Amino acid sequence: MVTPRSIMSICPHLIPQDKCKTQYEGFITVSGRDFHLKVELPPNKQLKNARVLCGWKLQQLLHGCKDVVCQRIQQSPDLQTFLVELKITIEKMLESESMVTTGEMPRLYTHLIQQIEDIGWDSTLQDIYHQFSQELEKYQDYFDIIDEIDGKTWVLEPENPSYASTLRRIALGSSSSLQIDIDPFHPRVLPECRFLGADHVVNPLRDKLNANLERWDPLQSALMNLHNIIQIEFPSPSKIQKQDFSMECGICYSYRLETTIPDKVCEDPRCGQPFHQTCLYEWLRALPSSRQSFNTIFGECPYCSKPITVKMVTK
């Protein structure tokens, strides 16, 4: 039988929700991304009769390999083995997600023609506008929740927020931030969450969220739920001072490096200098005093000389 400790070593943010250890909920982390996951085991804890519920992002990612996932549920000897294989599957899907092939365009055109046929080739512009307005109304709750986030928090990413992007990276202060991904179809359910910053700052917040998932109220907005659960006041641009949140990378002295912003922070609370992962990796790799173990480089912070580590940059 798999113990909670062995499961936690694989998915430290997948927390048992009952004393019998048949209900698990939290996040599975792959390639630096957190995906919401819930596992319901039967009383006999047989995995083949388990229910695995994924967040919407993970559902989309695994859409093309549902049969494989279902097969592994049936054949894996225990939950620990299944979680390891699930992480491998997610990692492969993330790698293929970034590859754009020319075969996608014909499928796009086919889908577009199908939508026009559904509307009707003889429809007037007024008919199309009416149908478009009806579709927009379905997303009004999503629009309201995004407006609340954009209006009441300091949004670091995207640079120019719009409804088209479901992702928001929100400043928390002390060079830390929270990245959330809102489901436009179910905007009031628990979003995908990822805390970024020094461990001593973000770990207590992450622990609060994981320990109080059952308190998530679908009748309230995402921002209100996060405020109640992690008990933090989200700073807004009108109230926060620039010195309270150092944004520029301490190596290249810029905020945005291509499509990334600083996401690695010195753990020393007296320093807290942020860096782009790529910049810090290249900096440490060039120092003779740094050492590497597997995919991690160990060295000293360029600012305070305290120990700092960074994982090897991969594409």
Image (spheres, grey):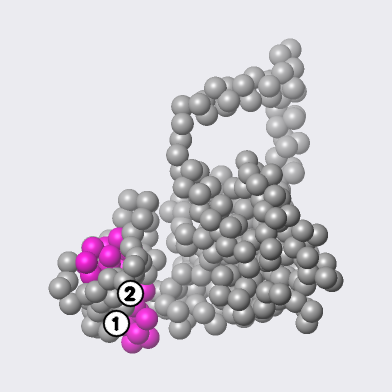
Q: Which residue is mark 2?
A: 309
Can you give x and y, in whole percent of width and height, for residue 124 in the image? 72, 17
Q: Residue at x 57, y 62 (%)?
A: 84
User: What distance separates the C-alpha of mark 1 from that of mark 2?
Assistant: 7 Å
Comparing 19 with 256, the one in front is 19
Three-letter code for the amino acid on which mark 1 is drawn: Pro
Query: Does the magenta portion include 281?
Result: yes
Query: Does the magenta portion include 15?
Result: no
Can you give x and y, in whole percent of width and height, for residue 169 in the image? 50, 62
Against 147, residue 124 (above or below) is: above
In the image, farthest residue toward the right: 43
Q: Which mark is residue 267?
A: none
Q: Residue at x 74, y 12 (%)?
A: 122
Query: CB under 8 Å between callouts 1 and 2?
Result: yes
Comparing 74 with 149, the one in front is 74
Examine the rendering and report whether any part of residue 247 can be seen.
no
Q: Which mark is residue 307?
A: 1
Query: Picture quarter containing residue 159?
Result: bottom left
Q: Quadrant of the N terminus?
A: bottom right
Three-letter code for the amino acid on which mark 2 is drawn: Thr
Q: Residue at x 64, y 19 (%)?
A: 113
Report helix, strand or loop for mark 1.
strand
Query: Picture quarter containing residue 306?
Result: bottom left
Report helix, strand or loop for mark 2.
strand
Can you give x and y, in whole percent of width and height, for residue 222 in the image? 66, 64
In the image, farthest residue toward the left: 288
